[in-house]
Image (spheres, helix red, strand yellow):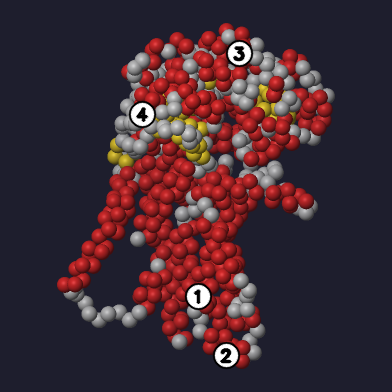
Amino acid sequence: MKKVTRNRKAIVAVAGALSLAATTLMTAPAHAATTKLTIWSFGNVIDTSLQAEYLKLHPEIEIVIKKGDLDQHHSGLKNALYSNVQPDVAAVELSYMGEFRNYSKYLTDLNSLSPSATTIKDDYLPWRWDQMKAPDGAQLGVPTDVGGLAVAYRVDLFKKAGLPTDREKVAALWPTWDKFIEVGKQYKAKTKSNFIDTTGAIFGAVLNQGTEKYVSADGRLIYSTNPTVQRAFTTTANASNAKIGSLIPQYSPDWGVGMNKGTFATILAPAWMLTYIKQYAPKTKGMWDVAAVPGKGGNMGGSALTIPKKAVHAKEAWDFIRWYLAPEQQTKLFLDPKNGAFPTTVSAYENAKVVGYKDPFFNNAPIGAIYSQSATTLKPIALGNKDRTIDNTFGQALSRVMLGKQSSSAAWGQALSDIKRAVG
Amino acid sequence: MSLLQKAKMMPSRKAAGIHAHDKWGFLYITPFFTIFLLFGLLPILFTVYLAFYHWELLSEANYYVGFQNFSELIKDPYFWIAVRNTFSIFFISFVPQTIVALLLAVVLANPHLKFAMFWRTMLLIPWITSVLAVGIVFSQLFGREFGMINVAMQYLGLPQVDWVGGTIPSQVAIATMINWRWVGYNALIYLAAILAIPKELYESAEIDGASRWQTFIYVTIPQLRNTLTFMLVVGTIGGLQTFLEPLIYGGATGGDSRQFSTLTLYLFEQAFINGRFGYAAAIGIAITIIVVIISFLNYLGSRKIAGEEGVKS
């Protein structure tokens, strides 16, 4: 009997966990919608104003969105792919692509649809397109955005600290990550306040400036030997030990408070991060600017939209995806002052409106020029099956360093043995 | 459960064997057993089966591994951290929860209390609140930098506490969420038990000149023995399932050093984050074994208490 209760409770708990942080946004149209399109996503993958625009064009469609946080969304999606209840459209984030692109048995090959995905392929950045290409050649997703790296910084706080505020000069302060940490120390000494929101973010940035991270191009696991991983880890640990970051986790409620209060002066910002900053700290409009990242450019994040095999409305889903991710819409999204996701459609990089776009929220920084330059020079990083697990395990290790619970080398050792257990 | 206990206390029927009209009884219990079979028994059997496999969702290669999952589990330090956390969270939630609930119940049992019904209803409000909502709100209250509790402590000149990173503080925070939700419910159960205590006992205590405190210690508490045992049993089983609070508070690993990873959370992490369903099934079986052991200890304890009572009456 007790066992039964336990199992029942576990089921309830799992169901709860899936709906945890999951908000169901229903758009109830005034007209009679006949087709209910279910979309599972996370973060800002589906933009509400673009969604509303689509509904205006298609009165027969009703869109139901289920949003969860990154890991919950993907584990929920995996369970759904195993079962019969599947959404019509599902988002897959870059750190999960290495895994999900193997699921050609569970995700629709978009090349097999009509019109075939091959007809739109040339609109997109080739390497982003190929990230959702299954080993058997099936195309399982269409890329949403590309996250070229940059640094968002608070002009007012830099001024107070006696640092230059001009974005070119700011970028010149930190040609390397070591210099970045130095500037952070100076800032902290002068203001007694934190330089960066979280030093943990440096890890992903350094990692994504390389060409390989956890797996080699031929698919071997190299997380323990790859010098880029080691360099990313030590750089981050050094930054933590220099105490230049706050201890606030990103996307937590405290993060928003800290951003509004100016508890930290910089945030590492792939293009999509600009949207988060606008959402979390709308009152800081005009106080920010964007400068180049230390080291060279890199891509961080970005997603793809997929159609599960058992989607009820696969045809409508495909219509939606083709419209939503078409060059016009991606451009529109980038130019929307509330957003900032950078297009994966190549025509955008020559579009004068995109390239010339200056964002008033970020002190009229030429973010169009900054991100399109980085998007065209970016090179893809080989994806692995367990990227996210490894990301998270290194992240926890670095968090222990940040909180002073472990030395850098002890944390590195524990991370490697944890990963070995989880991944092999 | 309490009904069951009462049923046990009633004199058992002498008549054994099934009469013809009793057969209809089977029809009445069919719906329950059908559902139990589908959603209770089958998953249990499948869990046992899974525990002997290397099993990943959406993977083509799932193979039999024998007892390997179990031998790994015994040597898994994270499993034992989860065991430790589960019990420590249980203790720091159950003990204060029981004390506060008892005191609340005594206050509510006072016949001179105004708006008694209102207060009793109020007690249940936390209990009907969704765990998700509780978790999210408390996570904000316990926020490291700008959480209300730390801000208040700073205001009072107390040192800042890392409610997420620290082992004991984080467990206290989680226990607080559990307590907040369950204190009222427990208080109502104790209240019902207190109201069932014969008035004569209190009257004679009063005549003997017992103080309120003495009445509480020597009359109320002994009379609540059965209820206390019952709450301990239910509480331990509930405590061993602590899951959603730590998940909302710090994700599936239960904090960066697993400082609040519990057993069910570890099961969840292995199954749904690391995709190791076989290993997770082995953890599930280990939890069951732990529950059985604890229940057996509870049973021994409650028999002892019941025996003592028998001698007294």
Evaluate if marks 3 and 4 touch, with contact meaning CB atoms under 8 Å apart: no
| N-term-proximal mark, 3 vs 4 | 4
Instruction: Check the image and report above or below for A338 versus B239.
Output: above
User: Pointer 3 indicates a residue of which chain?
Assistant: A
Label 1 secondary element: helix
Q: Nearer the viewer, residue A51 or A124?
A: A51
Instruction: Check the image and report above or below for B120 versus A322.
Output: below
Q: Position of residue A191 (x, y in %)?
A: 81, 32
Q: Is residue B242 visible?
A: yes
Say which amino acid is labelled 4: His
Give how far apart the Cα atoms at labels 4 and 1 are: 56 Å
User: Where does label 2 land, which residue?
Assistant: B204
Neighbor class of circle 3 (other Cα within 10 Å; few <14, some 14-19, many 20+) is many
User: Pointer 1 indicates a residue of which chain?
Assistant: B
Label 4 secondary element: loop
Q: Nearer the viewer, mark 2 or mark 4?
A: 4
User: Where does label 4 land, which residue?
Assistant: A313
Q: Position of residue B80 (x, y in %)?
A: 48, 50
Q: Position of residue B97 (x, y in %)?
A: 57, 64
Q: Quadrant of the N terminus of chain B?
A: bottom left
Question: Are the residues under badges 4 and 1 in a single subunit?
Answer: no
User: Where does label 3 land, which residue?
Assistant: A354
Query: In the rendered view, does B102 fall on the left or right side of A172?
Result: left
Query: Residue sitting at 29 percent across and 59 percent down?
Result: B32
**Number of numbered tags placed on the structure image:** 4
Give how far apart the Cα atoms at labels 1 and 3 are: 72 Å
Q: Position of residue A152 (x, y in %)?
A: 68, 24
Query: Residue sitting at 52 percent across and 15 percent down?
Result: A328
Neighbor class of circle 2 (other Cα within 10 Å; few <14, some 14-19, many 20+) is few
| N-term-proximal mark, 2 vs 1 | 1
User: Pointer 2 indicates a residue of which chain?
Assistant: B
